[in-house]
Amino acid sequence: MPWRPDEFNSDPFESRVSLEELALVLLAVFVALVGLDVFVGIGEPRAVFAFAFFGVIPGALLLTLLGYGPRVELPWLLYAIGVSLLLIMAIGFLLNLLLPEFGVERPIGELSLGIAHGLFVIALAFAARLTDPSVRTISVPDTEAWREWCARWLHPTTLGFLLLPPLTILSVVWLNHTSDNRPLLVVLAILGLVPLVIALKLIGRRWLGISVWTVGVSLPYHDTLWKFSNFGGQTNIIDAWREGRWAITTDPPFAAETSLLPNVTLSPTFAHLGGIEVLTQINVFNPLLASLIPVCAYVIFGRIFDPTDAALGAILITFIHPFYFQVPTMGRAGTPVLFLVLAGVAITDTDLDPVLRKGLALGFVAALATSHYGASYFVMLAFLLAVLLLVGLRFFDTIAFGLTEPQLRRNKDGVRRGWGSVVSTNSYTLSAAFAIFYTVFVYVWYLFTYDGRRVWRFFTRVEASLIDFFTSPATPRGGTTARLTREYGTISIELSRYIYVFLSALIAIGFMYIFIQRFTGQKQVGKDILDEYIVLAGGIIGSFLATFIFSAMWGGGRPMAISFSIIAVLAVIGIYAVVNVLWGSYQTVVPSGTDEVDQKRKRTATRSLFAMIIAILLVLNTGAAAAVVLGGGAPSSVPLQEQIVADADENPTANSNLHFGQDVATYAWINTHGNQSHGIHADLITRTAANDWYGPQVRSAEDPERAVSHSWTNDLFDLPDHEGTSYAVLSGHNTDLGVGIPREGVHHTGARAGEDLSDVEERLSDENRVYTTGNSNIYFTSDDL
């Protein structure tokens, strides 16, 4: 049998190693690898070691200083990783703030970061020596225990799950080189069967965690390693890595102007310490951070619900398309989700010291607040709603049971109600003070950074949303509403949308189910329900519902990823509730005795039904169904590579994939050499690619000494009537097909044709062409030409 975290504690040990000594030895190894990389060139080992070392050890040392020493337990490892990320962000912020005062031009460059992080690890290691030796030591098992441990890891089940990520990587590499999608389709089918294997209990409880993690690693890699994949938006990550600094405000101006602290600290720091390109860090290493999201969710769910249900809920998180379409590269889409689930792990950890629990939760939500303004406001509303719900629960307890808050606080084991349910433990992390701290921190941060633009933008959008809602309530313009009502023109997306609606209904039912269980004490879905989870889930649901009304530009995928990371397991509970009602109705018509065996069979059948539903969702979202049966597009198009190439003769969006390299070079050229005072005319695909899809790649290809930002706002089809000077960009798809997509056009994979460019081309000639790659061209137009 494979290793379980809690089993190490019972094994015999013959020696112990102190964490601070291990940290110093590993730091020396890192320094040696840096030296070898500089003089010999061994980039990959250095990058892997730097990512593992600085992603775990600093946090482990700080936790030890706080009295929470090393232990072979999954929550401790998650805390160590989370705290390490916090420290990277804090060090980057302080270096960028202070070093320029001493004349350092690259405060977060490779040299500054290397020295700062090395010295910080040394300081933490020596400080850790002041703690109790029993807290800072790591037990080393004896020879016999090591043999048993290795035998468990070499179990066929363990090896089978561990093979999923490399098989996924190999199948994508094969697809990139041959356009043969059959190996990838087989891998996706295997991943789709994992929840069914869990539901049928074909694997033991000890394999649930590793099954969640391996699926959580495999699906992001199937997208980030695809040759047509691109990391859209967030060019400030590239700027911070390239320039070695970022601008907290817009004065003085630097390219890396942003409010998003993780963007300019996490990926650039790991890339500098690892000696690799930042795009390699984003596409190869960041998916490993994304894989922690379902693992954290599994820990949260497992503390409240049955482990099998917890695993199914965590797997659902990995099967929704944002998880492998937006989240894997982290940045503004994935980082806030990771910090939210890390905070959730701390909030639900009733075994942890209350002070440390609150400190970890506050640290993680503070990091979340700096990750993305939209996500920050989303979670802020969720916390405020959660506190209101918690106050309501406390008021009900006082009225119904006469239990006052002081009574609840005095009893550390909880207070049993008359109906049998249990009030959560005495010290609550999620409180009014917690929500107020987070709210104040969000507004202070965004007022302090980027000239406060994100705060004013928030109020502007709220005002606009309220006006739209009250003036035309029948046609809400919320971001999620727009995505639910949009016509995508493909069967896979339509069916996927129906499943999302069905899962959302199950989540709502599941929430009501546990809410009722909280008062009745009937443990039909697991353990005692923690009040903090109930109110947090309620707050998240309320905040997600708000996206149907507010924020026309932010809805759908990103708020879904945030929400499902906390409430996905409620879909499992919801389907139990539905089946129980249907089964009860059936028994009233056809009475039959039920015993424990029948109940277990019913639960297994219900779990299997849920597993099949989310498996269908996976094959729809990944494009597997479109590639084999349905045709058309899908939320993710990786298995559709051959179809994309075949459609390139008539579909502008598909055609644009074939010219990725040339288009990137073209957009980089105009940003480097173009006159900023002149506008740029381009079609919708080109503008979206230059500003979003290809942003980081374009920024990486620019000349950092000369590049400036340009306004890509002019529609290509307005060029014939334009007076004055401007640039016109014809990307590869424009030249190949002679068509473009106008400003009001649709450019998803369902669009089959654009509009003819004959009138535009009449205004252009070889004489005013200033740059070409053969397919992509830039023209400078003027009334005098």
Image (cartoon, grey):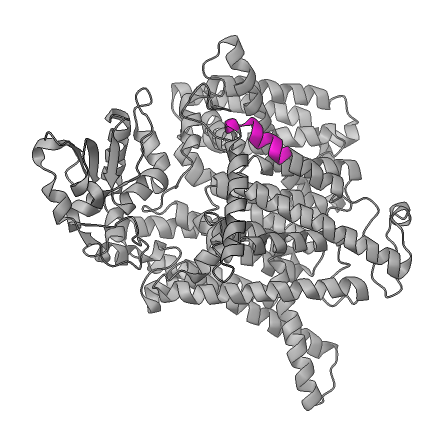
Q: Which of 266 and 703 is in front in this view?
A: 703
Residue 287, image x and y in percent?
A: 48, 43
Asked if residue 726 can be seen in this view, the reply is yes
Q: In which quarter of the image is residue 727?
A: top left
Residue 169, image x and y in percent?
A: 40, 48
Above or below, 714 against 207 in this view is above
Q: In which quarter of the image is residue 204?
A: bottom right
What residue is shown at x 34% (from left), y 66% (from top)? 628
Return the residue found at the far bottom: 590
Q: In the image, is 101 to the left or to the right of 180? A: right
Q: Quadrant of residue 435?
A: top right
What residue is shown at x 34% (from left), y 29% (from top)? 709
What residue is shown at x 70% (from left), y 50% (from top)? 386
Which quadrant is home to the N terminus? bottom right
Q: Which of 69 and 246 is in front in this view?
A: 246
The magenta span reads 441-451
Which quadrant is home to the C terminus? top left
Residue 270, image x and y in percent?
A: 49, 30
Asked if residue 71 can be seen in this view, the reply is no
Above or below, 591 against 1 in this view is below
Q: In the image, is 678 to the left or to the right of 191? A: left
Q: In the image, is 781 to the left or to the right of 596? A: left
Q: In the image, is 772 to the left or to the right of 85? A: left
Magenta highlight on residue 442: yes
Magenta highlight on residue 348: no
Residue 692, image x and y in percent?
A: 37, 40
